[in-house]
Amino acid sequence: MAVITCSGILIVFLILLLLIFIFYAYGGIFRAVTNSKASKNKKTDSEKSAAQQQRAAAAPSASSVPVDDGAIPDEIIAVIAAAVAALEDGGKYSVKKVTRAQRQSGSRSAWAAMGVYENTRPF
């Protein structure tokens, strides 16, 4: 009886170790594929930026090119103000200042965090 129990426990742990190795190998394969795609994208991005620099040098009228200074567009501010007004009972509100929230490095965006929450919440 003890031999059967010990051999059963040994087989279970060996299979678990085999599964851990398989999942680790799959993770390495997917990381390698993701890294190779990212490096290809970096190359194409650098090629695109070089082409853009050449076009910018050829076209000296830089005043017609819109500049993104990180400001929030007026349309987004209007939508935020409308959402605030919709939450309240018709009071008079005005948006004084809208700033982007600072994300901590390595954290998910609000949309990604909500997706994780929706897909992992208990029933």
Image (cartoon, rainbow, N blue to C red):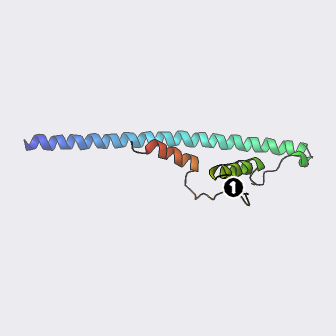
Where residue 33 sits: x, y (%)?
54, 39
Q: Residues within 10 Å of mark 1 (few under 14, many from 20)?
A: few
Residue at (57% x, 46% y) in the render: 111
Q: Secondary structure at mark 1?
A: loop
Where residue 50 sits: x, y (%)?
78, 44
Residue at (75% x, 41% y) in the render: 48
| Quarter of the figure that contains the N terminus | top left
Q: Residue lying furthest bottom in this view? A: 96
Residue 37, by quadrant, is top right
Answer with left or right where residue 52 lies relative to residue 80.
Answer: right
Q: Residue lying furthest left in this view? A: 1
Closest to the observer: 119 or 17?
A: 119
Query: Relative to 88, is 8 above or below?
Result: above
Residue 14, by quadrant, is top left
| Quarter of the figure that contains the C terminus | top left
Where residue 101 sits: x, y (%)?
64, 58
Closest to the observer: 79 or 21?
A: 79
Closest to the observer: 10 or 102?
A: 102
Residue at (21% x, 40% y) in the render: 11
Residue that carries the numbered disc 1 in the rendered image:
91
Where residue 106 sits: x, y (%)?
55, 55
Residue at (16% x, 41% y) in the render: 7
